[in-house]
Amino acid sequence: MLDKIKIIFIDLDGTLLDINQNGTHDISNKNKEAIVKAKKEGKHIIISTGRSEMQAEKYLSKLNYTYAVTGNGSIILKHNRIIRKIEMNIRTTLLLVNYVRKNKLLIKVDGNRNVYNCYSLIQKIFAKKFRFIPFSNINLDLHKKYHKFIIWGKSKKKMFNIQEELKNILVDVSIVQSTGWSLEITHKDATKGKANSYVARKFYGITKKEEMLHIGDSMNDSTCVDYMKVVAMKNSSKDFHNLTDLKGPHYKNGGLAKVLAGEIIVEKNENNFFKKIIIFLLKVFQIK
């Protein structure tokens, strides 16, 4: 299954981070050893995550990495140094912040710990639990360019409706509803799919789709479908699971190691028409 694969991109949450150490996610020895083995076999291993470079670094440092994709593709790292960053324009920031204020949503900027707007009791509890700082305590520079926003709402249905509204408000952005409760917003050229493809082509000379593989579990991994083979872990969101025929085991207790050992099931989706519709909608709505 992996014989022709030359480069493998791996998501962090729900994929690589398979154990819990003292209340925090971590990488099991099984996964570490599997990555070392894959490298010895000549495969390039690249972390591709929605996390910020700061959040990802403690895991990257354990893997002796060269390149990494963070912020859903908005940032590419080389040895802890940013070598490419794609930011949204200032008008996008102004429009989005105004929308968040009007609709009383939570918004997180560039992966920082600060979260803005705490109107409801639920939002305040959420903010306190994760040690977020309320909007009133922060002076957000609205004339600065940012590379990623995450916004949260009160329900999955509401966030779906908000996604539909934002498609008509924001220009040149990619919007993915990764967890259901949240939307991840980046520049249209800052997606995992495009960033992964860029790294493969620019630094390794790999351009063929059948020689590239991405392993993940959520809709922010869905942007890779057009550029490379994609494995959906068993714990994947339903929408993402339906986008690819390649299925992996559950991520916990070395699930990634099993995938790297070739434990991949080719499972044709029962409704291939539905799959094509999802891919078409992603192209139309994620990138306006």
Image (spheres, helix red, strand yellow):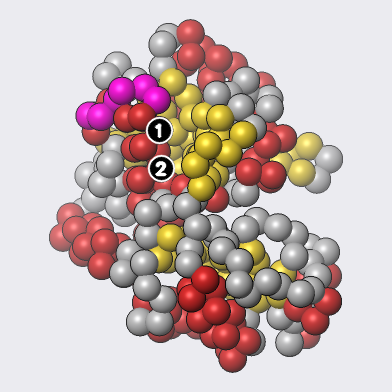
Residue type (three-letter) at the residue carrying disc 1: Val
Residue at horizontal 59%, vertical 79%?
A: 97
User: Of the numbered discs in the image, which one, if any, rests on residue 85?
Assistant: none
Residue 216 appears in the picture as rendered: yes
Lateral position of residue 125 relative to residue 146, left or right: right
Residue 104, compared with residue 109, is above or below; it is below
126 up-or-down from 205: above or below = below
Disc assigned to residue 199: 1
Magenta stretch? 203-208
Residue 81 place in picture, x, y as percent = 62, 34
The percent coordinates of residue 244 (x first, y second) are: 29, 46
Give the number of the disc on residue 195.
2
Taken as a whole, is the magenta stretch helix, strand or loop? loop
Q: Amino acid at mark 2?
A: Ala
Q: CA distance from mark 1 to mark 2?
A: 6 Å
User: In the rendered image, is residue 233 in sight?
Assistant: no
Q: Are marks 1 and 2 in contact (CB under 8 Å)?
A: yes
| Residue at left offset 47%, top offset 47% | 73
Q: Quadrant of the N terminus?
A: top left
Q: Give the percent coordinates (x, y) of residue 139.
A: 76, 74
> Is 28 one of the magenta-colored residues?
no
Q: Residues within 10 Å of mark 2 (few under 14, many from 20)?
A: many
Q: Residue at 19% x, 58% y: name it.
A: 276
